[in-house]
Every structure is written in C-alpha cells, then in structure tokens.
C-alpha cells in the first residue's frame, strides 16, 4: 500500500473475526486511503485536487480534510519546514510520480518553482469540508504524513473490532498498543541508516504510542558523485545536505510522528534537537560523523526510555 509494504500483528483476535476477514478489511481500508491520498494514482482525490486550477473552494472528503488539518498544524508549528505544498519541487527533483531526472534542475528553475509553494497558500473552510488554493499551480504531496495517517486508520479499525493488543506498520511508520505475544511491550527496531545492508541501531520497548522514522538513506540518487536526498528543504527548494541521517519520533498518533519526523529531517541535527526540547517531543537522532554514526536523544525520549526499560 502507498508504494510500500505493510505489516499488522495482533496478539489475539475476537472469536467473531477470522484472520482472512481481518486481512480483507485492512486491505479494503488501505485501498480506500490510497485512492484518496496518492499522487501516483492519477484519479485519486488528491491528484484531482492538484489538477484543479481553480482558486475557489473545492469540496473534499472528511478523510482528506483531516490530513490537511494535521499537515497545516505541523507546518505552523515548524514555521513551514514541514510543508506539503513542496510537491512541485519533489517532482522537479525526480522524487514524485514522474521519471527520475537525469540531471539536477538549474538554480533558475528551482527559484521559479519556489514561487509555487507555501503552506499558507492552502486554506481550509471552518464550515463544511472545503479546501482552497491561493495560487492555481499549488501541488500538495502528502507522502510525509499519509503513511502515518494510514497506520492510525488501521489501528482504529482494529480497535473497533475489539482488538486491544496490536502492532501496525506501513513503510516504517508504526502504531502499537497493549502487549506482544510474550506479554511484554512491543519490541521495535530502529534501523541503522546504512545503504549497504539492513542493520538495527537500537531496539525500543514501547506501547500505546505512534512512531515514525525519517531518513535520507533509502530514497536518493547520485549524479557525478553528488548525492541528492528525497527530502526537500522548502526554504531553498533543494534536497537536504546536512549530517542528520535519520530521526525517530514518538507521538500519540503515527500521523503526527510522521509529520514531525519529516520536519526534523529538514531542520538538521542542531535545529531539530532544539525544537524537540522546546516542544517536549520524544525524538531519537542518528547523526553522521567522521567515525560512522552518533546517537542523540531529546530529554522527552530519554524519559520514555527509562519508563520502558
């Protein structure tokens, strides 16, 4: 789903539902979300919204409205460093639905595209389910938050069915509740940000929380020995180029954790740590050093570590 794999574990199912029926319901729900939030699906609700060049109010579903609301909340909190309107720049650098570019765009083209972004150009109606663009070419890309939303929706489905111990994961975004089959909190690995092979940096013991990890070590390309990350800084219009390799965020919802992790990757190691401290956000940072990788964690994350161990 959403261009990646998903994984759902439940310790115990109510007698009223079989694994096959649960699988069917989860798949149906994720297909619905993909049909609303995908930029790769040309007839998805989001794609149709992006294709609409009207600056009038456009009716949208309650689901898309909810994700837009959360996206704008995190955009304001991060002073626009999380910005779902960078979609045209994501496409320009070859990380969207179009083919990957063979050469990076020129400074002039990037500067031109910067005039087409800005979360302040996206408005939501306080009465009814409507959204509006201030500029016709505004292009919304929810890839930095939609997987987290999908995780939360699957978790809500499980709870409606009476499942109280579960782990839901979509493309690395996670939601856990209750206990695993050993009667303990869920053991979740944070991946070491290496491209050579998959390795675990740290195992977290968590429950009743959302979790998201963002990094620049999977989705990138190189041209002439220069590496271009998929994470675009809305201030410069260019891929990030700092020492923060990955960040893991814990939050009440996976959607919020997903958006915050994306914002932290834009900020870089120093700014994101200060932001996490100021806003009491549990965050775990893996930073590139001359000797490999270093770890850093916010105070709120360290306190959570003490509680779970």
Image (spheres, grey):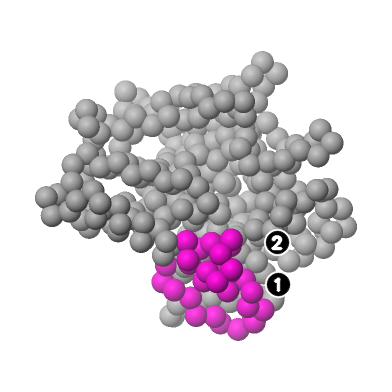
Q: Is residue 84 above or below residue 63?
A: above
Q: Reply above or below: 184 against 279.
A: above
Q: Say whether residue 235 is visible.
A: no
Q: Earlier in the sequence, mark 2 or mark 1?
A: 2
Residue drawn where x is 75% and y is 57% of the image? 92
| Residue stretch in magenta | 34-63
> Residue 93's x, y, as percent?
74, 52
Quickly name the residue at label 2. Answer: 88
Instruction: Please tell me whether residue 157 belongs to the stretch shown in magenta.
Output: no
Q: Quadrant of the C terminus?
A: top left
Front-lying residue, 189 or 278: 189
> What residue did someone put label 1 on?
137
Residue at coordinates 54% horizontally, 36% vertically from top-left?
247
- Badge 1 marks a residue whose secondary structure is loop
In contact (CB < 8 Å): disc 2 and disc 1: yes
Asked if residue 79 lies left or right of residue 205, the reply is right
């Amino acid at each position: 789903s959403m261009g990646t794999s998903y994984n759902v574990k439940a310790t115990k199912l109510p007698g009223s539902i079989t694994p096959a029926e649960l699988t069917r319901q989860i798949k149906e729900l994720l297909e619905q979300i993909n049909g609303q939030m995908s930029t790769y699906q040309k007839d998805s609700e989001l794609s149709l919204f992006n294709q609409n060049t009207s600056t009038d109010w456009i009716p949208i579903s309650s689901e898309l409205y909810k994700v837009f609301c959360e996206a704008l909340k995190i955009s304001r909190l991060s002073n626009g460093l999380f910005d779902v309107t960078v979609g045209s720049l994501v496409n320009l650098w070859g990380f969207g639905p179009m083919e990957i570019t063979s050469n990076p765009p020129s400074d002039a083209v990037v500067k031109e595209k910067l005039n087409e972004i800005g979360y302040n150009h996206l408005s939501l109606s306080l009465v009814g389910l409507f959204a509006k663009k201030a500029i016709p070419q505004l292009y919304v890309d929810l890839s930095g938050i939609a997987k987290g939303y999908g995780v939360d929706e699957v978790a809500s489905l499980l709870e409606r069915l009476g499942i109280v111990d579960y782990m839901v994961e979509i493309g690395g975004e996670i939601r856990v509740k209750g206990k695993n089959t050993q009667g303990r909190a869920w053991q979740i690995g944070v991946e070491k940000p290496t491209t050579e092979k998959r390795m675990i940096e740290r195992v977290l013991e968590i429950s009743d929380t959302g979790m998201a990890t963002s990094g620049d070590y999977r989705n990138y390309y190189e041209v002439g020995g220069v590496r271009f990350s998929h994470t675009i800084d809305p201030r410069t219009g260019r891929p990030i180029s700092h020492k923060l390799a990955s960040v893991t965020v814990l939050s009440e919802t996976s959607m919020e954790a997903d958006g915050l992790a994306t914002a932290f990757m834009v900020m870089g190691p120093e700014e994101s740590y200060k932001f996490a401290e100021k806003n009491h956000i549990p965050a775990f940072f893996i930073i590139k050093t001359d000797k490999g990788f270093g770890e850093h964690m916010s105070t709120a994350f360290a306190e959570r570590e003490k509680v779970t161990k």
